[in-house]
Amino acid sequence: MNKLNLKVKINDITHTFNTPEEFETWAIKELQQWDWLQNIQAPHPKSPNFIVQQNYIRFKQQLDPLINNLKQYLDSPQQLENCKKSIINLLTNPNQHNQIIFSQSKIGLISQEIAIKDSTVATGFLAYFIVQKSTHLPIITLGSFDGSVIGSLIENKEYLTIDNKPEQMGNLLKSWDKTLDNLGEKYKSELDTLSNTNDDLIKQISKLKQTNEKNNKLQASTIETLINDTTSKLEDLTEVYNEKLSLQSSVRYWKNQTKRYNLSCWIYGICSIISAILTVFLFWYFSSKYLNVTFSKLVIWHLSIVIASSLFCIWITKTLVHMYTSNDYLKTDANERVTMINTYLALLRSKTDAIDKEHKTIILNTLFRPSTGAMLKEDNPATTIEAITKLLKTAPKIS
């Protein structure tokens, strides 16, 4: 089996280890004196307790697998050499602050002595050196602050040894008092500044809150007005749309009626002209045939035929003319109804001339009044069928 031959220089002392077991025994002994770090409470992730505790735990977690690798790679020179380099870097790299926890470290020895009386002060002392040697730690307790101040004094070589004289102790205490006073004034000034800034922020927040409340009220009022206006417009549009739907079929119906009445006017007009011409012709024909004699020779039944045919033709002509005038009137009435419906919808849409319920009833009654009679009198027919029926009933009977 090959020898380990691991040499590590810690705090100006070189340690030589020939076997992995020898290094493991030394490492366990060194770490045991820091077991108290695992039991301290670290509620805040930025507290000195947490910083020191995590640094120790991380160091231990990195060291344990390296010890196992030493045992595993003892017969593999290349891998063993890499493992040894990793161990040396872990133990001696100043950026990792691991040297302070060894028995030969002055910082480690002082922190152990402080931990006997107060572990919080001890962790504050260690945290000073771990966090870039700064007294501006996220201090959570007064003990942590005391520890960081002690670390600052130690860093400036103002630490005690066994050979210190009483006057050196007094000088150290005076130095501590002076440092604490300076720090106290510094933090008091910063506290006053923060307090003033806090007051200004409170005033600004109060003003912003008042402005925000006014803006919220104004926006709420504007939104409410907009909603009411929109709702009113939607209701008006809905009413107009519903009215249009209800009257749309009426408009279509009256337009179709206008076309029908117009066609009927042409038919009855042409028929009236033909009937008038035919009446004149028949009267002339029967007169020249049956009445072209002296009164003494006049045959009664011939006269009856002429009178009956004349009355019949005049009746038909009168009826056709009346049907023509009725359809012409109905055509005009249908056009007026279409115009009135469109005007009514326009008034509803514009809202400029409000239509009250009474006027609305009058308009609708006018629009939907029966138009069968039109201008016809009660004793006259309104349609072609009625005219023919009445004509047949009233036509003179030839005996």
Image (tube, rainbow, N blue to C red):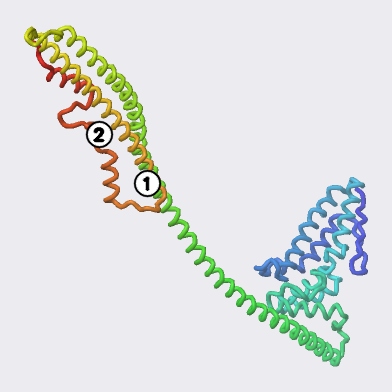
Q: SS of the residue at dot 2?
A: loop
Q: Which mark is residue 239?
A: 1
Q: In this view, does 394 lie above or below 152?
A: above
State left or right for residue 244 relative to residue 12. left
Residue type highlighted by circle 1: Glu
Q: Nearer the viewer, residue 301 or 273?
A: 301
Q: Residue 128, percent across and down? A: 79, 73
Q: Nearer the viewer, residue 231 or 362?
A: 362
Residue 331 appears in the rendering: yes
Q: Residue 371 carries which label?
A: 2
Q: Number of numbered discs present?
A: 2
Pointers 2 and 1 in contact (CB under 8 A)? no
Residue 399 appears in the rendering: no
Identify the image quadrant of the C terminus: top left
Q: In this view, does 173 lie above or below 211?
A: below
Q: Residue 346, percent across and down? A: 40, 45
Q: In this view, does 56 lie above or below 109?
A: above
Give the crowd class for mark 2: few <14, some 14-19, many >=20 residues within 10 Å.
few
